[in-house]
Amino acid sequence: MYGDIKLFSGTACPDLAADIARYLGVPLGGRDIVKFPNENIFVRLHSSVRGQDVYVIQTTSAPVSDNLLELLITIQTLKLDSAARITAVVPYLAYARSDKKDQPRVPITARLVADMIEVAGADRYITLDLHAGQIQGFFSIPGDVLTAFHILSAYFVEKRPELINPVIVTADLGFAKKGRNFAARLGTGMAFIEKRRSANDAKAQAMTVIGDVRDRDVIIVDDEVDTGGSVAQAVQIVKEHGARDVYLSFVHPVFSHPAVERLRVLPIREIVTTDSVPIPPAKRLPNLRVLSVSSILGEVIRRAHEGRSVGEMFNE
């Protein structure tokens, strides 16, 4: 129904895009992305994609506005060149926390981003670990919302023999369901951090831990680390309740200031995350382990192109 796979990437995650291309054995398409002195962004393809099955790989981490506009302009460029199908591959979707009107006179920006991706010309989307499941409903186009849970949990399954009576701790109650899946995979118990958010910023106050962590190795799991405030409080609370070694596992290393400084001084044995957001050398801590999501994204691209089930990858 479609032509060959064509891969293109923005400038946000070149290493991840190259890894996906290697997995598929397909070269990245040539393109020019220029930012003019007036900050306008210009995209030009090196060759035609008429009738082809095109995938645009672009994460939307900082600088968010530039990376998001690159994605939208690249999609429109491909649409105007008569690509048969365009899939936006967005490992990290910006504005995902703005997913509801939880107070008067505020936007639902996640819905706006979904609309812009569709209006730009995308026929499908692929993304990883959305902050909230309802964001899928903001898209009118089909898509695959994947999870890095399988990669992260497999890493800790291998480490399981060296852990002392481990317990999974979720950084907040909203992540409890995914945390339960993590615990089931490792065959461990669970505990929860109760926290409350009272202002229109990234700050939340951790209150207490629900569950037993005393004399146990703790694996704190979450979907992302932004400024690191919640994680710092979670580590402090589990340590106050007698935890042994603390491990931290999350999907998206957003690492806004001062996350790296906070993580550097915390008593964490190991920080395990993915490359859904590129981590510059200055932010790579000695105890940081980065697992690649290129194989998951690459395999889903292959299956989408061939019209095969994605759920079969995860026995679903």
Image (cartoon, rainbow, N blue to C red):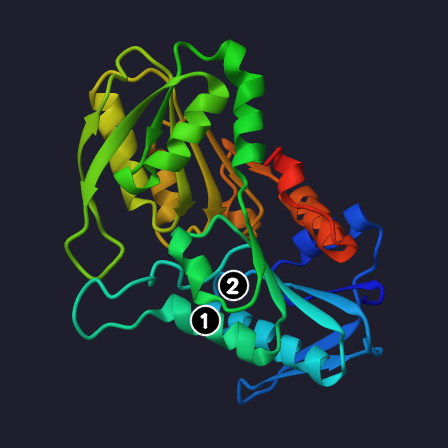
Residue drawn at x 65%, y 45% as measured from the top left: 310
Q: Earlier in the sequence, mark 1 or mark 2?
A: 2
Residue drawn at x 40%, y 15% as measured from the top left: 166
Residue ID for mark 1: 113
Which of pointers 1 and 2 indicates the residue nearer the eye? 1
Left or right of residue 89, residue 162 in this image: left
Vertical placement of residue 201 versus 117, above or below: above
What kind of element bears circle 1? helix
- Give the percent coordinates (x, y) of residue 292: 63, 41
Vertical placement of residue 199 versus 221, above or below: below
Residue ID for mark 2: 60
- Give the percent coordinates (x, y) of residue 36: 60, 86
Taking depth in this image into account, of 120 and 71 the one nearest to the observer is: 120
Taking depth in this image into account, of 44 and 138 the one nearest to the observer is: 138
Instruction: Measure how far apart labels 1 and 2 are at the Cα level.
Output: 11 Å
Left or right of residue 151, residue 29 in this image: right
Q: Pointer 1 and pointer 2: residues touching (CB < 8 Å)?
A: yes
Callout 1 amino acid: Val
- Give the percent coordinates (x, y) of residue 309: 68, 46
What kind of element bears circle 2? loop
Q: Is residue 205 visible?
A: yes
Q: Name the quadrant containing residue 249.
A: top left
Left or right of residue 18, residue 220 in this image: left
Callout 2 amino acid: Thr
